Image: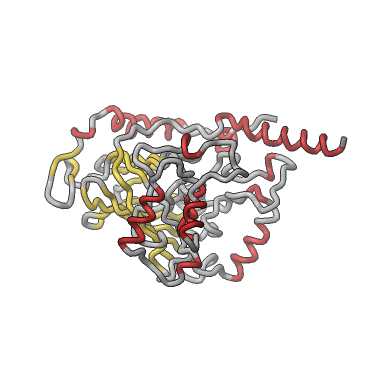
Amino acid sequence: MMLCSFELEGAMSRRQKMFVMAVVLPLILTPFTAFSQSTNGSGTRTAWGDPDLQGVWTSSTYTPLERPDNLGDQAFLSEEELTSLNELLTEEGVDPLRARSVLSADSEEERIERTRQSQENIHYDNSVWLREEQPRRLSTARTSLIVDPPDGRIPALTAAATEREAMRRQESRWLVYNLATPSYASHHTRTLQERCLAWRHEGPPMLPASYNDLIQIFQTENHVVIMQEMRANKVRIVPLDGRSHLSSKIRQWPGDSVGRWEGETLVVETVNFNEKVTFNGANVGLHVVERFTRMDDDTIRYEFTVDDQTTWVRAWSAEFPLMKREGPLYEYACHEGNYDIRHILEVARNLEQAARQ
């Protein structure tokens, strides 16, 4: 049986398609210069006066979401540490996937080892196929993206969330990542990412992706459009016209987002997530507040606060820069048609048959 992510997600309604054609397509076809004009030190503004967030940006960074245990209460790297690490991380031959754990290393030798491809994972040369024109680095001196709590760690789960997570782990189909001992019984036991239904980084809130990390932003007077390069869900179209959230009876994979301007900052609030997509253990009570602030021509400060009283003992916040890139942003199709799900299961059956012989 061949699965298709479009069948699993459901097709867009005719009204949704017409809206995308009316709002997004003109923005793509119109040069950015038609929408913006120069202003003072706060950056640029649109022709109608809002801060201009438009363009192609990247969330590229090696800074981890949570502070590694070995760094204790060290919230920031020294200037010397940051310079030394970035020199190491931008050398030729660095494996961008393995290097994500570089701050967890306890010695210089271990740091070097963690930037190189391991012999257990040689089906791709990650230093080649994940190479970027501007090499990935630590984009901030912080030792974690999390800024609150001060320890740089996700707060503890509530008792109810702990029980809920234990039940979810009995069936990996609702997990983003595989269990330590994954099941290949059927497509239902494969993860959300593997079935191209949801990526952990696409949010909201957004997190830096391991690769394909571009984000394109369009603006009109009444909407902001956020289009991530690697995404499973639709382009996010955020209304700015003061409307209320949809009814709590209408729950979606990426929730329901509405936005507003607070001075120079775009604030986007999202609620009404469904029970299938989890963000670090969260559930339908997840409430996300994102903030986009243009700091200069090349940088947007992206901040988010997440709260779910049924999941964590307290709210928590993170921030990281979005950095300007030339683009363009190309189409991302996951494994188109979900062919790889069939291939993964075929290999599992072949291995099982070989073991019986």
Q: Is residue 100 above or below residue 25?
A: below
Q: Is residue 230 above or below residue 305?
A: above
Position of residue 32 measured from the top left corner of the image (x, y, whole percent): 23, 34
> Which residue, as the protein is rendered here, is positioned at the far front?
109
Q: Total of numbered circles in the picture?
A: 0
Task: Report whether 197 appears left or right of 202.
Answer: right
Query: Looking at the image, can residue 234 be seen?
Result: no
Task: Report whether 251 appears left or right of 168.
Answer: left
> Which residue, as the protein is rendered here, is positioned at the far right?
357
Position of residue 178 measured from the top left corner of the image (x, y, whole percent): 63, 49
Residue beneath the point at 67% across and 53% down? 180
Q: Is residue 168 above or below residue 50?
A: below
**In the depicted view, which residue is nearer to us: 79 or 203?**
79
Locate the C terminus and report the quarter of the image it occupies: top right
Residue beneath the point at 62% across and 33% down? 340
**In the depicted view, which residue is nearer to us: 80 or 265?**
80
Q: Is residue 92 above or below residue 264?
A: above
Query: Looking at the image, can residue 32 be seen?
Result: yes
Residue beneath the point at 31% across and 43% down? 224
**In the depicted view, which residue is nearer to us: 50 or 298?**
298
Here the colouring is secondary structure
Q: Quadrant of residue 2?
A: top right
Position of residue 71 measured from the top left corner of the image (x, y, whole percent): 45, 67
